[in-house]
Image (cartoon, grey):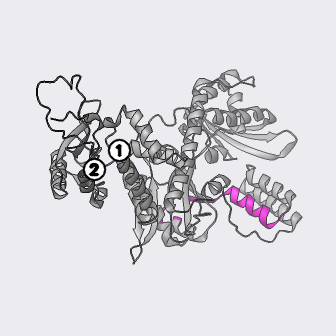
Amino acid sequence: MDNTDVDNVKPTEECHEVHNVDESDRLVGQLFCSRDQAWHFYKGFAREHGFSARKGTTRLDVEGNVKTQEFCCSKEGFRVSKVNTVDRQRAHTPVTRTGCKARVVVTATNTNDQWVITVSKADIDEATTLKEVGVGTAQVMNYLTQQAGGYHNVGFTHKDLYNALQRGKAKEIVDGDVNALIAYFDYKKHDDPGFFMTYSVDESGALYNLIWSDSTSRSDYTCFGDVIVFDTTYKDNLYGRPIMPIVGVNHHHNTIVFATAIIADETSQSFEWVLQNFLEAMMNKSPISVVTDGDRAMQRAIKSVIPYAKHRLCSWHLSRNAQANIGDPKFTAAFSKCMASWWTTKEFDIQWRSIVSEFNVQSIHGCESMNASLAIALKHKKTYLDVVRAIEDGISRMRMNELKADYLSSHTKPFQITKLVDLESHAAAIFTRESFRVFQDELIRETLYRIEAEIKSLSDECQHYILSKYAEKNRKFEISFDSRTKTLICSCKKFETVGLPCRHQLHILKQLDYTYLPGTLIQSRWTNDAKASAPSYVD
């Protein structure tokens, strides 16, 4: 018998022609109830296309359970070369391993109750990243082969990888942008049990409204969902549809995203749909306040869906409107000061009439504004999937900034600058660094005030104080203090608005020799432990 060097045997032409079938490309994505069912399916597929199949390599998880199983052509691979092939007494058995590359890999789903034919997510993600920076498919395959410790450990061929990448591209472009987006969200749901997504379609079955939120955003809402902000000033490039991020502020005073919606139009019906599904995603917890850009349709939707929430106009939009419509820097500065100052209603009216008179302002109309960072991120994005990934990139950067702020708050100590050492130290220990900075700014300014009058109530537990500021004796602030509950209420309402103690309350604490902040002046959302009780994900 001819002693052929089996290491150099190439796949036969017959084998190549048998396996060169388009049907194999459509196997990826098929689901099976068990690994055995997948095996019986592939054996039948092999018979239909003129080859026999065998089981290949498996991969186990940390608990020893099979997570991936390879099924391949019986001619896959090559016979291992023996040490002695010349002086061998027994005849060589026929060569059956000729290097055929027909194979599939089945992977257990997260719940382990189904198996799917796939190229692994990790491999696809890594391959996609490499492709995006210009690495060719052949070089990607070589890299993955080296990473896996050899070709036999990869579990798929060069063609499998190419087809998988092309399928992803086709889903995004050829098969329809919306289908790719929904498929992408379904895929996210497998990786993130708390991922929420819902959408509506019009009469023709086309996408109408869409909203999504991942488990981290939903968890954040349980801690910081007292105030939400949203507008529709962002538009995607391809379809011109409004993109509506619903955002808030975390304990580091940084923007966080609770959910994002893509809507068909800016009608009250679309806004109502968004708010109703947003509440569903957030376990029907309503916000205390909603800040918007003043859109009338949005106002109607808020009143309909969350009637008890306080609706406020965004000061950023108001300032931008003032700048755009008046164009006088002096007016913008006066207007911003008027908004930022802690006036009573009567004082605000006086100040506003003074500004209107000085600058001869008749009315200020609304105008759209654009957040620069998101505008840049969306500038060159075409498809829905592009937009979603751009938003996800932005959210990832926000979360990275939060991690950095967490580290600074827990591993650094702020510099103290007042003589109220104990009070300042207590605040430094409980508040995040940014919250402490705001607190410290108020603490510094408490020295600008003095008590003009102290009025005792009929009961000894409650006291009232009248404060005035040096050089501004016409401005008075009233503070009441209940010694039983340690509650301080100031007429400036800053604590009720911002959630951090005002300079007037701190002045009274100093007068009462407090060396710590009473719990009534500590809002947990501004503390280092703000997320201590937050769920890791939401079912």
Mark 2 surroundings: few (<14), some (14-19) or many (≥20) residues within 10 A: many
Q: Amino acid at mark 2?
A: Ile
Q: Would you identify the image quadrant in which residue 289 lies? A: bottom right
Residue under label 2 = 117
- Identify the element where label 1 is drawn: loop
Q: Is residue 539 visible?
A: no
At x 19% / y 55%, what residue is drawn? 45
Q: Position of residue 223 (x, y in %)?
A: 49, 43
Spatial separation of the CA atoms under disc 1 and disc 2:
9 Å
Q: Is residue 312 magenta?
A: yes
Outermost residue on the left side: it is 90
Residue 35 versus residue 519 in the image, above or below: below
Quickly name the residue at label 1: 120
Q: Residue at coordinates 55% horizontally, 61% vertically from top-left? A: 244
Q: Is residue 330 magenta?
A: no
Residue name at image x 35 percent, y 48 percent: 190
Q: Which residues are magenta?
A: 302-327
Query: What is the x, y in percent for residue 31?
Result: 24, 53
Q: Is residue 163 left or right of residue 425?
A: left
- The one nearer the camera, 505 or 499, is 499
